[in-house]
Image (cartoon, coloured by chain):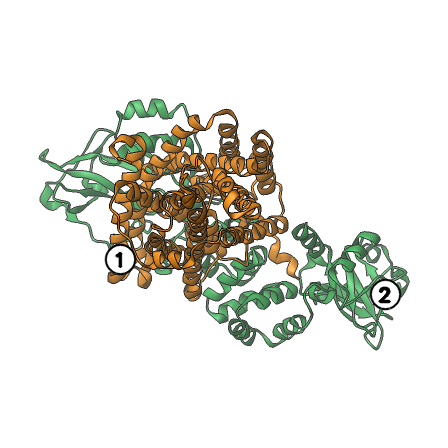
Chain colours: A green, B orange
Amino acid sequence: MIYFTELENLPIYDARGEYLGRLVDLGINPSQNPLQVATYLVRTPKNQLLSITHTQLPSISVRAAQTRVPAEEVRPYTPEEDLIRIKKDVLDQQIIDVNDQKVVRVNDVDFDIRPNDGLTDLQIVAVNVGWEAAVRRLLQGVFAKHTIRRVAGLFSQKTIPWEFVNLIEPDPSRRLRLRISYSRLADLHPADLADILEDLSRDEQKSVIESLDDETAAQAVSEISTKMQVALLESIPASRAADIVEEMPPDEAADVLQELAPETSAQVLANMEKEEAKEVRNLLGFEENTAGGLMTTEFIVVGDLATVESAVAALKAFDGSMESVHAIYLIDANANLTGVVPLGRLLLAEPGAALQQLSTDPIISVPFHADEKGVVSLFNKYNLLTLPVVDDNGRILGEVTADDVLDLLISSK
Amino acid sequence: MKSRSLRRYRRNLLIFLAVLGPGIITANVDNDAGGIYTYSVAGAHFGYTLLWSLIPITVALVVVQEMVARMGIVTGKGLADLIREEYGFRATFFLMALLLVADLGNTISEFAGLASGMSVFHVSRYIAVPLGALLVWVLVVKGTYRIVEKVFLAACVFYVAYVVSGFLAHPDWKVAMVSTVKPSLHFDSGSLYMIIGLVGTTIAPWMQFYLQSAVVEKGTKLKNYVQSRWDVIIGCIITDIVAFFIIVACAATIYISGNHEIANAGDAALALRPLAGRAAAALFAFGLCNASLFSACILPLATAYYVCEGLGLESGINKRLHEAPTFYSLFTGLIVLGALAVLLLSEQKQVPIILLSQVANGIILPFVLIFMLRLSNREDLMGAYRNTRAFNIIAWVTCVVMISLTLLLAVSAFFPRYIPK
């Protein structure tokens, strides 16, 4: 194991034993080998930057390194080379620890050093984020390397294996060339992904969102703060913003659109599918801090003469988020709410049973203009998971779910 | 529906008030106990004659603060983050260590300010300081967004106390106005030293870190850059309007009375009493307590934030204690040490710590300013928003003047005999 702090400033000699310069950076070429150091960047005393390839450098140790070619055969470095540069791109930068779902800053980088067929392979193993590495950085170049190892060893170590390290690169074309992808982030829970997003700067957030599919992006965006939602959605093209907003639950979509600048909001709405846009526009008409402002329009209704069988069919056909479905609502020919059937009752009933028989009695509902506090006290009093919202004629408009009430309570605490 | 917008409210505690801009909040924290004392001394010793210096100080403040605000908006990163990414771990570590020392000194002077302000109301420091420290800690750690927001909004409004006490002191407005616009250059060492003090207390390193983080947390967008610039300019003007009224109040009373010696800002309030009346004195002392508590809330919190940010440690009030141990230790440690220093040490014994903190400030400021200037000129970071040539000239001149003045202040803190009174 060898640390980048021990390799930095290493004296490099050429085949004739003449001093070339000092090692300033290591480059990995992900399209060739994602782990192997491919290039050694050396700064000459004349301040020129050289690029020594892995095959040109057979011997490397903590003391020095020597090339197998004379100085004339070493190329100068050109920035066009597609390299992940350890010092420039990894050290001191923020990375995503995919395993612990955290954004951390890199203090040092660990390499495995081993001879291989007359060459020395340097393979990246992990990044170091603990105090031990911090102490190494602090003492680097001041004391002898073995002394530093001893002193730093007294402090706690924390490493993240390279396989769990996700670099953050805002430039999409460079991301492509360096094969940096955020695909692993899509597997995280949206709430964890949102936590990661909140630790990133705006450009970095944008780059992560750009590379996620609409649904994952929508789930994560739903979980971040409104301020960040707004900043993020205003910084990406309106068509993409529309794709993401479409995938969000309608009540959250309406929340965001309300906060966006009016012209952006209009653009996003114009780019959305007609159906979803209509739903969201509808919600935008309700006042904040009322039951109507709190509700979502994603819920399941069936006619009140229907049977359990058709309710199950309606459930199967429902394309909203299943997690929030706790009850189905019964309506009569005028769309008036006539019953609420909890899912549990549905599960135990015979397929042919009439739904009306399964409805809770009395039916608890709330008019759309009732204020938030009234909604909260209904949830509290009747131990509700969901609460239907109706208009003045008793027609169902939407439902308020317990998680919205929880958010409300926490934020107003 | 609104509920979600506040869901992650705690993360945004740094900016505190959505209604006020980061620039205005920074400005209010800047007028802390140390600042109030310095302005009082300026008025008590030199009357109206140094008022003119407020205008160039405002300009310098605007130049520096605009630069960090712009960096925050364009990069979306804090100053500590940027310095870490561009200048590496060691530079950041030493900068943060010095900042910690400087801010410990600042925190001590906040609690000292609270003690001397409350003494005007005959409240013992042994009651005022522990209660103040507890209040600050509980408010920040246990307080909810809505309460904190209201408390800080009130604190910002209470700075008006100084304006009122300035009027109650019945100053000679004509002389005051003329002195403000017409520089009276006396190059005697006493007034030069005073000007250095004024600059040093107005333009401090921590502000740059605080403002940039606050701008980032507020999520200001590039297209709102113009509003943000106004926020900074208005904030700087507010800072110096408050300074103006404090100087004027002391000039109209203490300076006129002939006995110019005031040992602390509470003394200034007491000295106002015979000449400007009980109300003016009470307002002055109240303003001092308010400013001290306000800054004692924000300084330790902000320090803990950017030290952790720079060193890559977990930070934030939304984290639990075991998730962000260093953050909480720093925040609590600063408050506890700050309060203890005031309780256990006599005023004389506090002096070396305050001096050390001034020296630390003096050492950091040049680095911070030079880092800032270099970062805000980087094309890869700032793109089209990097400094223009004209701005660079103004900024470099400002920075060179400020660096020289601050170094002079730091040197004079250690070797007072080389600066003749």
The picture places residue A106, in percent across and down from the top left corner, at 39, 40
The quarter of the rendered structure image containing the N terminus of chain A is top left
Q: Can residue B373 be seen in this view?
A: yes
Residue A375 lies left or right of residue B8; in this view the side is right
Q: How crowded is mark 1: few (under 14 residues within 10 Å), some or many (20 or more)?
A: some
The picture places residue A31, in percent across and down from the top left corner, at 32, 52
User: Measured along the vertical axis of the image, is residue A138 above or below residue A353?
Assistant: above
Measured Cα–Cα span from mark 2 to mark 1: 73 Å
The disc label shown at residue A228, or none: none
A295, A312: nearer the viewer: A295
Q: Is residue A183 visible?
A: no
The picture places residue B158, in percent across and down from the top left corner, at 55, 51
Residue A262 lies left or right of residue B74; in this view the side is right
| Residue labelled with disc 2 | A339
Q: Are marks 2 and 1 on the same chain?
A: no
User: Measured along the vertical axis of the image, is residue A140 above or below residue A390?
Assistant: above
**What residue is at 56 percent from the left and 38 percent from the top?**
B120
Q: Mark 1 lies on which chain?
A: B
The picture places residue B80, in percent across and down from the top left corner, at 39, 45
B362, B177: nearer the viewer: B177
Amino acid type, label 2: Gly
A84, B24: nearer the viewer: B24
Amino acid type, label 1: Ile
**What residue is at 28 percent from the left and 39 percent from the top?**
B407
A221, B283: nearer the viewer: B283
Q: Which chain carries label 2?
A: A
SS for callout 1? helix
Q: How crowded is mark 2: few (under 14 residues within 10 Å), some or many (20 or more)?
A: many
The disc label shown at residue B394, or none: 1
Q: In which quarter of the image is residue A384?
A: bottom right
